[in-house]
Image (cartoon, rainbow, N blue to C red):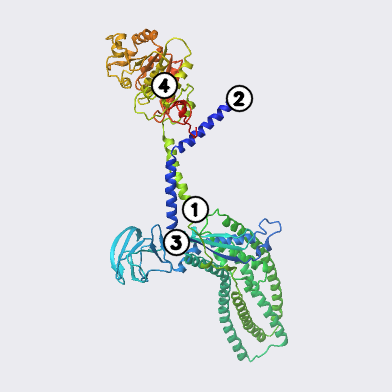
Amino acid sequence: MEKLEEIINLIDSHEKKETRNFFLRYLKKWPWFVGFCALGLVLGYFHFINSPNKYQIQSRILVVNEESSISSVLSFDNPMKGMGKKANIENKIGILRSYTLYRKALRNLGWDYSWYHKRLLYNADLYQRAPFHLDISPTAQNAQNIPLYIKVLNENEFEIIGKGQTSQNGYPQQIDMDQRHKFGDPFFNDLFNFTITNKNATVDETYILVFNNVDKLTTQYLKRTQINLEEINSDLISIMIEGEVKQREADFINELNDVFIQFGMENKNQNSEHSLEFIDSQLSRIKKSLGAAEENFSSYRKNNQVMNLGQEAQTVYTKLEEIEQEQYLTQLQIDYYNDLQQYLDDSKKIEQMVNPAVIGITNTSLNSTLDRLKDLYSRREVLSFSVQEKNPSLILIEKEIKITRDGLEETLKNQLKVTESKMESMQERYNTIQSRLKKLPDTEKKLIGIQREFDLNNELYTYMLQKKAEASISKASIASEIQIIDKAMVEAAVQIGPTLVKDVGIGLFGGAAIPFIFITLIGFFNTKIETREEIEHNTSTPILEGIVKHKYKVKLPVVHHPRSGIAECFRGIKSNLNTILDQSGTKVIAIHSLVPGEGKSFISSNLSAILTKSDKKVLLIGADLHKPTLHHFLNKQEAIGLSNYLKNEKSIEDIIEQTDISNLHFIQAGPIPPNPSDLLDSVKFEKLVDSVQHKYDYIVIDNAPLLLVPDAILTSGFSNISLFVLRINHSHKNEIKQINKIIQFNRIKRAAIIINNAPDRGYGYGNKYWKKGYGGYKHKMSIA
């Protein structure tokens, strides 16, 4: 249990260190954050005072609820029942969002070109405040979406600059012009043709003229306009748009509403138009037949001197006239039912079908269902221009169409069956009357036939005139389903930007984000060691006291500044070594680094100097025979040394030098030999160490960098401990793995790591007790 708690404590401690180091990485760069945040605040305020005002314009329309006629053909357990109202509203919203309506509205507004005034950070829209009068010939063609910069030079002249790319006759055309021109003179070239006269433009000001592309303008307004239900169960639709010019956006929304209402009225009028066209065609045909029948009737009576029919003939005639008129209308209805069944899946054909009431069909279910199907086909066509096939609104309309079509088809079958049965009954009555007609005299029979033809056409003509009047009244009484509750008004516009808090906040956030991202990227791509915790996390080798940064210009700060923080660091290392090397006799210490510049020689010389402070004798050996620098730290000139001894040129006594530091002797590397690795591998180096052990308490061996000279690790075989130096922000992270491999491969029993250039965090050795003894206590309130 205690071990488990210990493991948990270690994990918590590690997480705290990781968190501390994460924040410390950014806190060290606090001047960057302060500077960039201040710059962000200034830029945010600058953007605020140089941005255009932005307004929100809104209109509200009401969709008049009409009970869906589809309910008459649906069963009570149908899942679509009760959804007619919701679907109708969603369909209306889908139509309002259609590309076709937007394009028509923009066409009606006549926004063929726009004027802007160039400002510092934006171009101000001069809607209805044009600084120039622009005259364009009806046949003129002007390149679209190319900004033309017009600068007024004086009362008579202006400069026009245009750059960009357009398309002419399907080929790309590059525009690069800079011309001086006079007001009132036509400006004409291959791409432009217009005339400008000055109205109220200011001299030396720059204005921008853009000839708009209606398709691109339509796409822009489709993206900017928001159309939504005000509430879930409401019939009110809200149309909202944001823009810089209140009047422009209000004009657009109002025109869009007008086009939307006109679209609905056109669809409703279409049925009445088809009915009137059908009636007119029937009237024209009957009128011709009526004229011929009237003339034939008059001629027969005159030629045969017959004015009136007898009583029996009159009775037969009356019944025959009634049955033939009924047969005519019934046949029209049968033909209508057959045509309607054939065109159920053809939206174009079914749109051309006349209203059933025109030919005497009074079935309200049939009439309303047919109107509903026509309306659904029309809505589907409009939605298909602006939405994809999987759009929920389009899918819902398709479901409604299927249900409505199936209901209409069932109604048609029933009506056709009843009407055909009625026609058969009429035929039996007709045959009975015909048998009575055959018994009449020939003169009366012929007169009945002629008079019957005349009266039938006359009555049909009167009937059609009556139906035409009814259709005209029906057309005049059609009302729109849409009612405008609130027009888009400039007075009701709400200013929504710019916002000082938002602009300054974005500036502040951006200012803080730039150094944060920069520091994070540096850390991400940085392959060098930054903290002690990185080393602890990647190795099990003990880590001794770190060597803090210092600002001293001397080679041996432990000698010249014995009470400094760095001197205390070396005393800490000395204490660590004595704890690890708890043994009697001479202690041999080998100091290694993997690459040059990690401070190996600096640590070797200063550690040797600090070891002498306890009245101990120390021998410092410079074993870097490749590029020796240790003698510079002890203020010695290059002379004979280890290489001379290993080559049998000098004895041990000849190469040992006394330094300026009491109890510290030094063997420098000597002249660089041609084969330094072979010399260190010889028995003579081992003999050297064995020979001097009885004279010194400590022997410190300064070796060559291991990654450059792998054989330098050979000296670890003669040492009691091998110290590996890693330098913060200099040594690479993969060096930790290399040290682990070196220790494992060479079976080094005792090894430790010294961290050089560690950050001064106000705690530990060298940070509390220095400068003026205990009186100069240094304590920093910082994140450790």
Q: Residue at x 72, y 87 (%)?
A: 311
Label 4 belongs to which residue?
A: 724
Amino acid type for the residue under numbered disc 4: Phe
Amino acid type for the residue under numbered disc 3: Leu
Q: Nearer the viewer, residue 305 or 168?
A: 168
Label 3 belongs to which residue?
A: 217
Q: For the residues marked 3 and 1, what is the alpha-carbon distance in whole angstroms? A: 29 Å
- Tell me the SS state at disc 1: helix
Mark identifier at residue 502: 1
Q: For the residues marked 1 and 2, what is the alpha-carbon distance in whole angstroms? A: 51 Å
Q: For the residues marked 4 and 3, what is the alpha-carbon distance in whole angstroms? A: 71 Å
Q: Are marks 2 and 4 in contact (CB under 8 Å)?
A: no
Q: Quadrant of residue 670?
A: top left
Q: Residue at x 44, y 61 (%)?
A: 217
Label 2 belongs to which residue?
A: 4
N-terminal label among 3 and 1: 3
- Tell me the SS state at disc 4: strand
N-terminal label among 4 and 1: 1
Q: Quadrant of residue 616?
A: top left
Q: Is residue 88 left or right of residue 647?
A: right
Where is residue 716 drawn, in percent x and y?
40, 15
Where is residue 641 drawn, in percent x and y?
29, 14
Mark identifier at residue 434: none
